[in-house]
Image (cartoon, rainbow, N blue to C red):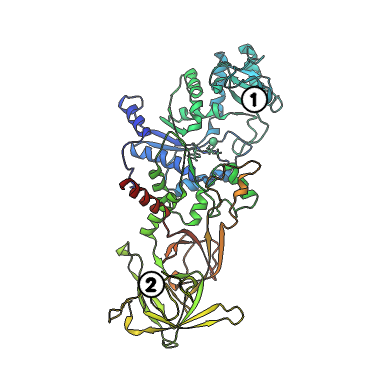
C-alpha cells in the first residue's frame, strides 16, 4: 500500500526501532485480535491499520486472530464478517488466520504447570465472594480460604473441572499472586471459569474457558508476536501478563498501549451497537448510519479514505475524541479524486424552455472529473423540458441570492444561459410548479459572445431522459456530540436523532448512471458524494448520500490557521 505515514516517528515506532536496534526482537510481528461477538467498527479500523501497517513498514507480519474465549456471545457469523471487513479495508493476513480456541489445550497444560509450581489454585468462592474478597484501591484484599490447597488437590480438582463434574460458577482456577497488591489485577485473578456452554468451534469439548487475562498474553506468545499492541485500558493488566509469561518462561512479547478511537456523534461499544440493531433503531449492522465498517461501506466510504483517516489521527497515549468532520473530510478528499461527476436533481422543479423546439435533443459534452484528466467527457442530453433543484429558484430572491428568479438570467451547466420569463403555480397551493424560461442559442457551452455575465450556474437534468431514483440522505445518528455522556435518568438512546435518515422518493439523475451497480460512487454536482445502494432494482436506483460537499473540517482548520497567524 502506498499511503504515507507522515510526520516523525510515533511513540510505537520509536519503541519498535529501539527493540530492533537493541536486538530484543529480530523482526516485527503484530496481530489484530478481535473477539467475534460483533461487527467491526471504525475504532477497530484504527487498530487494524496500526497493526498491519507497522508490519508492512518494518517488513514483518501481522496475524488475524479471533479472540474467541467467551462462547456465550460469539458466533461464526461474526468470524466471517470480520474476515470480509479486514480484507475490504485492504489487508492480507496470508495464511496466518488463528483462533484463541486453537490454543485451549496448550493453555490448559500451562495452567497445570502453574499449579505444579504452586502458582495457581482451585477456589470454591462464588463470583460474588471473589469480588468481596478482592478489596478496593484503598484496602487490601483477603486471601481465599482455598488458597493453600495442596498441589495434588488442585491438580485433581482442576482435572475434574475440565471433565465437567462441577456446576457452572461453583469453582474457578486462580493465579496465586498477592491479595495485597496495589494493582487489583494482581490479586489472584481468575484464570478459568466453568461454563457449560457449547463453543462455536470446540463444541462441547470444553466446559471450562480461559479468561481474557489468562488467554491473551499466552496466545500472543504462541504466535511469536513481538509487539502486542492494545488499547489503554489494558495498561493495568500488563504487570499480570508479564507475570504469567515470566512464570512460564516462554517467548515474551512487548505490550504497547495506545488510546482507543472515540468519534463525535458516534457510539462505538459493540454492546450499544448491538442494541441499536436489535431494537430496530437502525436497519441493521450495515445501516449507512452505523460506524461499522459494513455501514460505512454501504454509505460509500472507501477503504483508502478510512486508512488515510487512521494515519492522519495517529496514535497517542491519552484518550480524546476525534471530530467526525475529520473522517468526512478524508472521505471527501479521496472521492474528489476518484468519483466521476454527474448531474442529479434531488428536489425537482420543472423548467420549460419556451423557445426551444419540442422534439429537439442536443448532446452536450460534460467533464467526468476535473481532478482526473484521464476520466474524459460524456454526452449529456439537453431538451425543452428539464428539472432543476427547487432550491435554485426563488419567487422573491433575498439579498445575495443569485440563482434563478423572475426576470433573472443564469447559466445551465455545460448548456446555455436561460432567463425566467414566467412561472406556473398550483392553483390549490399557490406553489410554483413550473418555471418557464427562454434560452439564448448563442450561449451554448455557457458563455455569451457579447461578454455579458451571469452570477449563478445551475445543474439540471433532461426530463425526458432522466432516470428516476430514490435518494437517502443521512445526518448524525445522535443529536449530541458525546452521546455516551448521558444525563441523569437517560440513556444514549435518548439522544438518537429522529432526522438521521431523510428519504427523497422521486429524484432525477442524468442517464449516464443507468445500470450502475451497487457500490458505484459519484459526485452529484453541487450536492455531494453518493453511492448506489444494494436496495436498487432494475426499475429504480437507490442512492445513499455518502457525504455532502460542505467541508466543515477544512473550515475549522482554516479558522485555526488564521487565529494562529493573526
Ligand atoms: P468492546 O469493548 O466494544 O467490546 P473491544 O475492544 O472489546 O470492544 P475487540 O473485538 O476485543 O473489541 O477489539 C479488537 C481489537 O480492536 C482490540 O485490540 C482493541 O484494542 C481494538 N479496538 C477496539 N475498539 C477500538 C477503538 N475504539 N479504537 C482503537 N482500537 C480499538
Ligand atoms: Mg475485547
Q: How many numbered circles does the render carry?
A: 2
Tag 2, which secondary structure? loop
What whole-number distance in Å separates the C-alpha atoms at marks 2 and 1? Answer: 77 Å
Residue at which label 2 appears: 456
- The image position of residue 117, as x and y in percent, is 54, 13
- The image position of residue 431, as x and y in percent, is 56, 77
Quick check: 453 left or right of 533? Answer: left
Relative to the observer, which residue lies in front, 283 or 525? 525
For the point 45% across and 40% down, which residue is it? 47
Asked if 512 appears above or below 495 in the picture, the reply is below
- Observer-side mark, 2 or 1, equals 2
Label pair 2/1, CB-CB below 8 angstroms = no
Residue at which label 1 appears: 162
Q: Residues within 10 Å of mark 2 (few under 14, many from 20)?
A: some
- Residue 363 found in image quarter: bottom left
Asked if 51 appears above or below 182 in the picture, the reply is below
- The image position of residue 286, as x and y in percent, is 55, 53
Q: Residues within 10 Å of mark 1 (few under 14, many from 20)?
A: some
Relative to the observer, which residue lies in front, 333 or 49? 333
- Mark 2 / mark 1, whichever is N-terminal: 1
Tell whether circle 2 marks a residue whose Cβ is less than 8 angstroms from ligand 1: no
Task: Using the image, tell me which numbered label, if any, was put on residue 239.
Answer: none
For the point 63% across and 15% down, which residue is it? 142
Tag 1, which secondary structure? helix
For the point 53% across and 58% down, which residue is it? 474
- Residue 498 found in image quarter: bottom right
Asked if 126 appears above or below 325 in the picture, the reply is above
Quick check: 58 left or right of 520? Answer: left
- The image position of residue 82, as x and y in percent, is 51, 45
Relative to the observer, which residue lies in front, 550 or 161? 550
Amino acid at each position: 500500500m502506498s499511503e504515507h505515514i507522515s510526520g516523525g516517528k510515533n511513540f510505537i515506532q520509536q519503541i519498535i526501532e529501539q527493540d530492533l536496534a537493541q536486538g530484543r526482537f529480530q523482526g516485527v510481528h503484530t496481530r489484530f485480535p478481535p473477539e467475534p461477538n460483533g461487527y467491526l467498527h471504525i475504532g477497530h479500523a484504527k487498530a487494524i491499520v496500526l497493526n498491519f501497517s507497522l508490519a508492512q513498514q518494518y517488513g514483518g507480519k501481522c496475524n488475524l486472530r479471533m479472540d474467541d474465549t467467551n462462547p456465550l456471545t460469539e458466533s461464526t457469523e461474526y468470524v466471517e464478517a470480520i474476515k470480509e471487513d479486514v480484507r475490504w479495508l485492504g489487508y492480507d493476513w496470508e495464511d496466518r488466520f488463528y483462533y484463541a480456541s486453537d490454543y485451549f489445550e496448550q493453555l490448559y497444560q500451562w495452567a497445570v504447570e502453574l499449579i505444579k509450581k504452586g502458582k495457581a489454585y482451585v477456589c470454591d468462592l462464588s463470583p460474588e465472594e471473589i469480588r468481596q474478597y478482592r478489596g478496593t484501591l484503598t484496602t487490601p484484599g483477603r486471601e481465599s480460604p482455598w488458597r493453600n490447597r495442596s498441589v495434588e488437590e488442585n491438580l485433581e480438582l482442576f482435572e475434574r473441572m475440565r471433565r465437567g463434574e462441577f456446576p457452572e460458577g461453583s469453582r474457578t482456577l486462580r493465579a496465586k499472586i498477592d491479595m495485597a497488591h496495589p494493582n487489583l489485577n494482581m490479586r489472584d485473578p481468575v484464570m478459568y471459569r466453568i461454563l457449560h456452554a457449547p463453543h462455536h468451534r470446540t463444541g462441547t469439548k470444553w466446559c471450562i474457558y480461559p479468561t481474557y487475562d489468562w488467554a491473551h498474553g499466552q496466545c500472543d506468545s504462541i504466535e511469536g508476536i513481538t509487539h502486542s499492541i492494545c488499547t489503554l485500558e489494558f495498561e493495568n493488566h500488563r504487570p499480570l501478563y508479564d507475570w504469567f509469561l515470566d512464570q512460564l518462561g516462554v517467548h515474551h512479547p512487548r505490550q504497547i498501549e495506545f488510546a482507543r478511537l472515540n468519534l463525535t456523534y458516534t457510539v462505538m461499544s459493540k454492546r450499544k451497537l448491538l442494541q441499536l440493531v436489535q431494537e430496530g433503531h437502525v436497519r441493521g449492522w450495515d445501516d449507512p448510519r452505523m460506524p461499522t465498517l459494513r455501514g460505512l461501506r454501504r454509505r460509500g466510504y472507501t477503504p483508502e479514505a478510512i486508512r488515510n483517516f487512521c494515519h492522519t489521527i495517529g496514535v497517542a497515549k491519552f484518550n480524546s475524541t476525534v471530530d467526525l468532520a475529520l473522517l468526512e473530510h478524508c472521505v471527501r478528499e479521496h472521492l474528489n479524486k476518484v468519483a466521476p461527476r454527474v448531474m442529479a436533481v434531488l428536489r425537482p422543479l420543472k423548467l420549460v424552455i419556451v423557445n426551444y423546439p419540442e422534439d429537439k435533443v442536443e448532446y452536450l459534452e460534460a467533464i467526468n472529473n476535473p481532478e482526473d484528466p484521464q476520466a474524459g467527457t460524456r454526452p449529456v442530453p439537453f431538451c425543452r423540458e428539464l428539472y432543476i433543484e427547487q432550491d435554485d429558484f426563488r419567487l422573491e430572491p433575498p439579498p445575495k441570492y443569485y440563482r434563478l428568479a423572475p426576470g433573472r438570467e443564469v447559466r445551465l451547466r455545460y448548456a446555455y444561459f436561460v432567463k425566467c420569463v414566467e412561472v406556473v403555480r398550483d392553483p390549490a397551493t399557490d406553489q410554483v410548479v413550473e418555471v418557464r424560461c427562454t434560452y439564448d442559442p448563442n450561449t451554448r457551452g455557457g458563455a455569451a459572445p457579447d461578454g455579458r455575465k451571469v452570477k449563478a450556474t445551475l445543474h439540471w437534468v433532461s426530463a425526458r431522459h432522466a432516470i428516476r431514483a430514490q435518494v437517502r440522505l443521512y445526518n448524525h445518528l445522535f443529536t449530541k456530540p458525546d452521546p455516551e455522556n448521558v444525563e441523569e435518568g437517560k440513556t444514549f438512546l435518548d439522544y438518537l436523532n429522529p432526522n438521521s435518515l431523510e428519504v427523497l422518493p422521486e429524484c432525477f439523475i442524468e442517464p449516464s448512471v443507468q445500470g450502475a451497480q451497487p457500490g458505484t460512487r459519484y459526485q452529484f454536482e453541487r450536492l455531494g458524494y453518493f453511492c448506489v445502494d444494494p436496495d436498487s432494482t432494475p426499475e429504480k436506483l437507490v442512492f445513499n448520500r455518502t457525504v455532502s460537499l460542505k467541508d466543515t473540517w477544512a473550515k475549522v482548520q482554516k479558522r485555526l490557521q488564521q487565529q494562529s497567524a493573526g
